[in-house]
Image (spheres, rainbow, N blue to C red):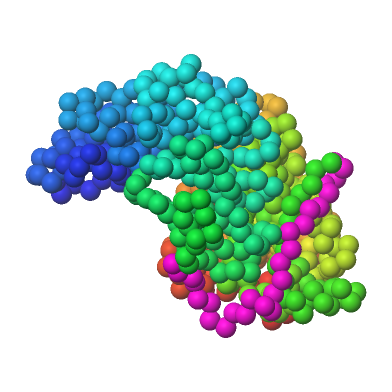
Amino acid sequence: SDKLLEVDGLVWGKDDETLYYVTMDEQHRPFRLFQRKNWKGSNPTDTLLKEDLDDLFWCGVYKSLDDKYVFFESASKETSEVWYLSTEEEGTVSEMKTVAPRRPKVLYEVEHGHGEWFIWTNVDKSPNMKLMTAPAKPDSADEWKLLEDASGKPIFDGSLAKSLDSVTVLNTHIVMQGREDGIPRVWTYQIDSKIMKRLEFDEAAYDVGLVSHFEADTKTVVVSYDSMLTPPSSIEISLNDDDAQRTVLKSKVVPGYDKDLYGCDRMEVLSRDGKTQIPISVVYSKDTMEKVKAGERVPVHLYGYGSYSACMEADFSSTRLPLLNRGMIYVIAHIRGGGEMGRQWYEEPSGGKYLCKKNTFNDFVDVANFVLQDWTLPEMLSCEGRSAGGLLIGAAINQAPELFKVAILGVPFVDVACTMTDSTIPLTSGEWVEWGNPNEKLYHQYMMEYSPMNNVQAGKKYPACWLTGGLHDPRVAYWEPTKFTATLRHANPDNENPICMKLDLSAGHFSASDRYKYYRELAYDFSFLLDQLKLA
């Protein structure tokens, strides 16, 4: 067929005769799963296997690593459901079965191996995901049981100690990814001996993750590793008892970079509530830190996000080097609303969503006050965030405009109450399980208390602001940074710090797709930043 389809996900069936693909609705929400037969012929046959018409739920398709099942997952931020179809039956059966029926506030994900479902879930209201198994059959919820180690102890019990994000089932091992002490972790579990081990690395803070694996029969795994000092590398690690058998397959070469010239610290900042410790990752030139130790104040750039349980990792970025080489300290604030400390860092009652969203902004301002104690001055402190991170920056400069000299707001989500009220805007209704539904009085009132557009202070000296937007952005419409720019200017017409906006007429939410244009766009950001800090 010559007809082009816009699809969101695509997997093969048992062989190359069958395809599965997911289509999107008018709001660009993935919602329907089709099976295509005779895809190479002139008259392919499409069968609708499953659909979810609830706007809160986004759908996807994937296949188990052992190739035995195709899964259709439908999930909101709080609830999920998974259906499956055996690849052995895909030629004769078109009805999918559910692993477990949808239950409010219960999230679960599924993989198959060794004749069982491997399920990671927050069932029974556990703060983090627990790892469970069940017979590979439909409606198995009553038979879920915790996976235990050789001593009979659950390897992931859903407690606050460590969080679980993904599970890969191999022939001899299970490989799990999650977090412990705020750091990404990888664990291996030997199925026969029931022994679990955590892969260890030398640096105090780093980013590590399992790369894509397509074979269940393997004696090694490959992880991607980097830190704020170490460029990315791919490392092959043995699954045998001696995981010290490691081979670096490839490392990114950064021309002119000398790791020994820089330093990195992992620290904690006490929040204003007097009990929550906010992790921060700090990278700097060693020469710069020597100046700080001698009592000199230096420029500091503070970065944050804090939404959707997304984690801002202590990873490597070559584009930070121009800032570090000019004597700046770069700080990532791992504030609540992210998932760095587990799901409790994100969820109510003490995280950073719904009616505790202000924790996100308060944490960021608390970190700013911390770096102002000994490292820098308000006229040398800059901050940055993108998308929901732009909301963070907008709320932070409204709360404490006197703390910052420069603010960079990339495609910022700053008109929260207005946007969330209009469900005709793409993606809006699905966001109600993140921010709350402002059509309900309680959530509307709370949003109005922090929405940057509605809380700009008149008569205050705001920092120099650089806002960006994309004309074709389906996530944060171009009028949001435009309105916020005008609001900031109107409220403080005598502000000597410039409020500037750059609108890209060809970009969407993620700016340029080619790397050279990305560098050019980043150069605009840095040029404004360095000019305002008088470091250009």
| Residue at figure coordinates x 52%, y 55% from the top left | 243
Which sits in the foreground, 161 or 492? Answer: 161
Residue 349 percent across, percent down from the top left: 73, 31
Which sits in the foreground, 96 or 322? Answer: 96
Is 266 included in the stretch rendered in magenta? yes
- In this view, 470 is above or below 376: above
Residue 481 seen in this snapshot: no
| Residue at figure coordinates x 79%, y 74% from the top left | 289
Residues in magenta, as a range:
249-274
- In this view, 225 is above or below 306: below
Residue 155 percent across, percent down from the top left: 58, 35
Query: Seen in the image, is 290 located left or right of residue 123?
Result: right
Query: Seen in the image, is 86 located left or right of residue 218?
Result: left
| Residue at figure coordinates x 22%, y 31% from the top left | 88
Residue 386: quarter of image: bottom right
Query: Seen in the image, is 264 located left or right of residue 433?
Result: right
Residue 356: quarter of image: top right
Quadrant where the C terminus lies?
bottom right
Residue most toward the left?
Answer: 42
Residue most toward the right?
Answer: 295
Residue 316 percent across, percent down from the top left: 59, 66
Is 312 included in the stretch rendered in magenta? no
| Residue at figure coordinates x 69%, y 59% from the top left | 204
Residue 147 percent across, percent down from the top left: 53, 30
Residue 197 seen in this snapshot: yes
